[in-house]
Amino acid sequence: MFDLADCCQQCGAALPVRAEQDPGRRARYCSNACRQRAYRQRTRSEPGEDHALVPRAFAAELTAPIDSFLGRDADLAEVARSLRRTRLMTLTGPEGIGKTRFAIELATRTRGVRPDGMLLVELAAVTGGELVPQTVAGLLGIPEQPGEPVAAAIARVVGSRRVLIVLDQAEHVAADCAHLVELLLGRCPGLRVLVTSRAPLGVPGEMIFAVGPLSAAASARLFSERAGTIGEDGFATVETICERLSGIPLAIELAARLADTLPIGAIGTRFTSAGRYGLAAALTVTHDLLGAQEKRVFRRLSLLEAGFDADMAKAVCTDTGISGKDVEGLVRSLAHRSLVIATGVPGGPTRYHQLEAIRRFGEERLNEAAESGPWRARGIDWAVALCRPLVDAVFTPSAPPGLIERLSDESKNLRKAVEAACERGDDRELLLATALTVCWRRQGYMSEGRKLLTTVLARTPCSPADRSLALVHLAWLEVMDGNKIVARQLAERAFAFARTADSPLAVARALSVLAGIRVSLGDYGPACVCYQECLDILREIKEIPSPLDIAFCRHNYAWAALQNGDNERAHELVSAALPVLRANGAKLTAILHTAGVVALARKELDRAEALFTEGLMLQPGDFRGPAYLIDGLAVVAARKGQAERALRLIGASARMRNAVQGEESPRWREQLEAAETSARRLLAPSAAEAALAAGRRLRREQIIDYARGRGHAVLSGM
């Protein structure tokens, strides 16, 4: 069997054949030159590139499928050789021919040739071409940065790494895929791209490989493996069936599943009389053999383009004749027939999806039954029920546990629900769009969220409460993009709509956002007034707000009070909020930083140091939090006269902040500058520059270790 483990991991050349009696370790490189070149690529750090600072990087691995892969070893070897000569390969072919399976098999077998990783980008459920780069960026954990196109951010992170990106089912977003691929290949010399599509992208340098049908022998073997034991007299019938199915693997898989309920002869008769060939024949025969309830559930599931779990299936498919429990069993039955595919991680919830060709066949049956409208409405109802708890949370992190994660998991289905609500003129479209925007913001898709909310706000009549909620989130998106004046105007409109809605929660939410925007504008006094009013409202509402809402409000108010020079009020607010947030673990890094700054203002240096260090012990996943905590430790060190440590920390935090754009308050910036100035006074100029340079050379984990006090071990290893 073809396996690139027998090829050099640097240049792809065939490795020398090792004698059977040679007990040595399998060679990875064909020559010492390739070995040295690979070493340099692993260890170099180009200007502006820090491997330790790449978020999640290429940790996403392709999982090798558990079923066998038949009849294409020669094709795999040919495409693998071609990928050593070209940087863009597109696998073309009709639906069901096995393009996706071919791509995954190739990627998993050639894993060692792409030492920096590989990524599978599934595009079937991506509805708008503008979401192609966002989908890739989301899988890589790359947040959108103001002023930087998403595609440019991907190129920056990929850099010179030797990686393979697989763009699967790209035909419906081909133009946007082509634009992204052309940009990435132009900027990322180590990148290879493998595309599956019914048609080429049309990018210069693209090499095309047409995935053809299986041979007669491979088709019969695939059918036999999937169907199980077949008597000697059945092989001729199997060959006839496979010929009727034109060697299309998906069609053969579907037909083979029928062997669980029909003898081989009966299956052959069904296909002989079907009047169709290929995948159309397999789908028609399989569908005709479904029971009445299975057919109803099958066609309704076609609405769930982005996959679904049991709860979603029940919400969309249950009717007077099919209970929720029935739906679960019927979905499992469809999965057994390969009409639905079950996925999930061990110990986690099971999710399902349909291959696009099967889903579209089901959608045709749905339209024939004139059920598209009513059952699409059921999908909107499900999505609205999922999103509605957002309205009862003043701050997004205080929403019910797991809600934001659940919404993020269903973000593609939410996008479909928004589109369906728009088509039906459903005024709940704005609530759905707002929830989707919250998910996108979490995933780093700020510009798309802003565009969507602006569009939906302009066209959708809705309640003042829903409009206020949407304006609040749109205001935050504008802040993140640097449009603070526009953001303030939106927050003021959100506040006005909240007053009209007679909703104390909506008023508190709008006040909090307006206060935060005023802080970013330097209007600290008015911000404190807004926070005080928000806090008063939350204290009056006994039954709804989470204690977290009040704690978050106190924390944000404390930071505004600090900037306004009211250190004692800030201390009072932080002291009340910190125990609640410590117990819950929410936004703990942020409040530990604020509490540390409050302690600095009160000249409690040991307490400030303990709070900043506690924040670093949390090992947060973002870059900005640790940078600000390290800034705090630098200020503490400078005030204690530890000049060399202070400057090393300042250099280290500057490097961390360079990875992610962020904004600092002027007052905090002044404290950092004062700390650097005082530390420089205690050292000779050359020693001061050496300390800053030493800090800048540290990588992320080394920075955090040094800041925690493990400085000797870190620096001795440099």
Image: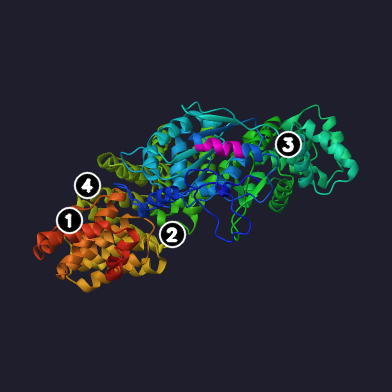
Are the residues flagged by discs 1 and 3 in contact, CB closer than 8 Å? no
Q: Residue at x 24, y 72 (%)?
A: 607
Say which residue label 3 marks: 251
Mark 3 or mark 2, which is nearer the start of the sequence? 3
For residue 393, what is the image quadrant?
bottom left
Mark 1 or 2: the one toward you: 1
Q: Nearer the viewer, residue 512 or 521?
A: 521
Disc number placed over residue 544 in the picture, else none:
2
Which amino acid, mark 4?
A: Leu
Of callouts 1 and 4, which one flags the residue occurring earlier in the amino acid sequence?
Answer: 4
Range of the magenta residues? 77-84
| Residue 532 appears in the picture as rendered | no
Report the amino acid beneath label 2: Ile
Q: Secondary structure at mark 4?
A: loop
The x and y percentages for residue 659 are: 31, 50
**Residue 612 percent location from the top left of the image:** 28, 66
| Residue 318 x %, y % | 68, 46
Choose the circle earlier in sequence order: 1 or 3. 3
Residue 550 placement (x, y as % from top left): 35, 61
Residue that extends furthest to the right in the rendered view of this protein: 233
